[in-house]
């Protein structure tokens, strides 16, 4: 099954061709992501109407390039279907992808399947080319941390999942982006905070660990963001400039607080559900400290669960993950 996948939920225009042959056999034949970072950077966040305009401009160019690469490498194969992100995301941005995908479907007489973006993140670990067929990985706990969502799932198998908890306010990535702005770091805040943290002391500021001790799997990061805001205001009142070591200490202390909550709650769920494996995915999963801290935490559990992370380039938004999720989406052409 060859899927042309289209992702336009936020600020990345993604087009990919993915070959899916079995549950654990998905191959990215070609993947292109055109980022709109420069368009949105001056606004400190993504502007939905600008995102839609850029997607509409980029989609034909990126699709042509992706298809050319595909047809050159696989002369005998043809596209079986189209998959596009239908939710969640920025409505104008989603609409541009949907219209494009539907039009291609009509022109080629192929189905255009709507796919959930969070399912895309969830199944992105299957894009790891070193992954082998596994029969001992369920129950599975999955932590999906993106700019718009923080979700913890338990899966009985690849098609049966239940949500354990999610954010009650800001998502983890959103908190990184907002705190990045507070600290005067460039957009997006996640990678900038990670970089700044390398030179900072994670114990320098004792920020709160929201919901850490609550006996549920929900998350809340708005209070933590406000705590950073008040700290920054106090420091500025004392004429301290938020830069260099101070900026790094604030970044590292904030990152530590977020990671403490994510790692502990995931580990607790793994233990409670006797999970045989853990998946970490979504844009924030690109954070190396999160990856290594969760890995270390899981190594403490007995028996030690398998730990799956998508390849680095498939953590943040991309179309390949939409192609994989289409394989698991039990849907007709109803989008
Ligand atoms: O999954 P994604 O690409 O888009 C959404 O579906 O929202 O996630 C984007 C989020 C942004 O908030 C960005 O700051 C965050 O992922 N992010 C990171 C890192 N790289 C991206 N957060 C922390 N550390 C990173 N290295
Ligand atoms: Zn995403």
Image: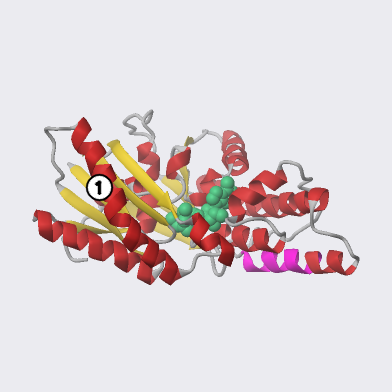
The quadrant of the picture showing ligand 2 is bottom left
Q: Residue furthest right?
A: 238
Q: Which residue is rendered at x = 56% and y = 69% of the image?
A: 169
Depth check: give the residue in front, 4 or 60: 60
Depth check: give the residue in front, 184 or 284: 184
Local crowd size for mark 1, using a 10 Å CA cut-off: few (<14), some (14–19), many (≥20)? few
- Magenta residue span: 221-231
Q: Which residue is rendered at x = 45% and y = 41% of the image?
A: 313
Image height of 250 relative to 98, above or below? above
Secondary structure at numbered mark 1: helix
In this image, 318 relative to 199: left or right?
left
Q: Which residue is rendered at x = 70% and y = 69% of the image?
A: 226
Residue 103 falls within the magenta-colored stretch: no
Read off the residue under disc 1: 64
Image height of 180 relative to 296, above or below? below
Depth check: give the residue in front, 247 or 262: 247
Q: Residue furthest left?
A: 109
In this image, 69 relative to 204: left or right?
left
Residue 224 falls within the magenta-colored stretch: yes
In this image, 261 relative to 67: left or right?
right
Q: Quadrant of residue 95?
A: bottom left
Quarter of the image with the C terminus is bottom left
Where's residue 39, x and y in %?
49, 60
């Amino acid at each position: 099954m060859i899927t042309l996948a289209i992702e336009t939920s936020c600020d990345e225009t993604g087009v990919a061709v993915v070959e899916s042959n079995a549950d654990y056999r998905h191959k990215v034949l070609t993947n292109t992501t055109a980022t709109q970072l420069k368009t949105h950077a001056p606004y400190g966040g993504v502007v939905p109407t600008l995102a839609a305009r850029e997607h509409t401009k980029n989609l034909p160019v990126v699709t042509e390039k992706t298809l050319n690469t595909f047809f050159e490498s696989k002369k005998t194969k043809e596209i079986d279907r189209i998959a596009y992100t239908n939710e969640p995301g920025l409505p104008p941005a989603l609409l541009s992808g949907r219209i494009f995908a539907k039009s291609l479907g009509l022109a080629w007489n192929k189905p255009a399947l709507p796919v959930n973006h969070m399912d895309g993140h969830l199944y992105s670990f299957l894009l790891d080319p070193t992954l082998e067929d596994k029969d001992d990985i369920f129950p599975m706990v999955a932590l999906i941390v993106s700019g718009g969502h923080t979700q913890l799932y338990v899966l009985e198998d690849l098609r049966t999942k239940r949500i354990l908890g999610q954010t009650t306010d800001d998502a983890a990535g959103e908190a990184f982006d907002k705190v990045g702005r507070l600290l005067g770091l460039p957009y997006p805040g996640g990678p900038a905070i990670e970089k700044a943290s390398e030179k900072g002391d994670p114990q320098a500021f004792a920020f709160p660990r929201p919901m850490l001790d609550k006996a549920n799997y929900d998350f809340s990061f708005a209070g933590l963001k406000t705590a950073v805001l008040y700290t920054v205001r106090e420091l500025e009142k004392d004429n301290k400039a938020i830069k260099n070591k101070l900026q790094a200490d604030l970044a590292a202390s904030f990152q530590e607080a977020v990671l403490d909550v994510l790692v502990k709650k995931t580990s607790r769920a793994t233990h409670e559900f006797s999970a045989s494996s853990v998946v970490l995915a979504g844009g924030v999963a690109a954070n190396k400290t999160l990856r290594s801290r969760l890995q270390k935490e899981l190594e403490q559990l007995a028996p030690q669960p398998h730990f799956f992370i998508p390849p680095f380039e498939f953590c943040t938004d991309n179309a390949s993950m939409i192609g994989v999720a289409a394989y698991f989406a039990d849907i007709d052409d109803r989008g």
